[in-house]
Image (spheres, rainbow, N blue to C red):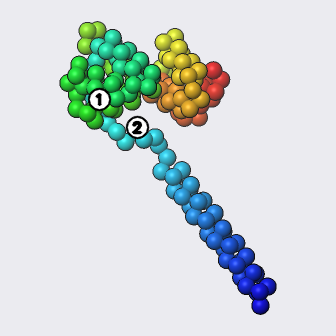
Amino acid sequence: MSVTILIMVEVGLIVALALAIAASIMILRRNTERGGSPGEYTNLPDVELDLKLQEEVRNLAHHGHTEEAIKHLRKQARLTPHEATVVVQTLMVGKTFPDPSTPQQSTESGPNAVVDDDLLNRLHLLVAQDPHKRNAAIQLLRDRTGMNAKDARRFVNAL
């Protein structure tokens, strides 16, 4: 009788383990099917920021003072809390916003865009800072050049 109970407990544990594994696999599949990045669903505010302000905010955020960076940006650029947060996050991954003091130039982007020295330096900095920033470097490269994900990943991995 005690052997039967032990066998039933073992079978119950095996079934529970199998269900947990199946649920984990389903969750992982669902998350990979969604794809994309969180920033993909957030519209960037259409703002022009002085390059000096962008550097100040980026430096504050990179040194762990993200809240200060958001407050400073809100005060200087008169942005809503949400807009300032999105702008700070965007600056942290290496993107820039247009400077109102410089005339608008037609920046080349798309499949024929060139990887210039500035972009290459930013990519090197992102990859050197932290291995987790590799995805940010890939996204920056894709945004600036129009590369597909596979080519951008190969490019960044070759750095």
Residue carrying label 2 = 39
Front residue (pair 137, 133): 133
Residue under the point 68% across and 73% down: 13
Which callout, 1 or 2, points at the residue further toward the start of the chain?
2
Q: Which mark is residue 84?
A: 1
Residue under the point 51% across and 52% down: 31
Front residue (pair 38, 78): 78
Q: Is residue 42 above or below residue 60?
A: below
- Label 1, label 2: how far apart the Cα atoms are: 14 Å
Q: Return the x and y of residue 16 as percentages of the image width and height.
A: 63, 71
Residue under the point 56% across and 61% down: 26
CB within 8 Å, label 1 to label 2: no
Q: Amino acid at mark 2?
A: Gly
Q: Return the x and y of residue 118 as percentages of the image width and height.
A: 48, 12
Residue under the point 26% across and 9% down: 101
Q: Secondary structure at mark 2?
A: helix
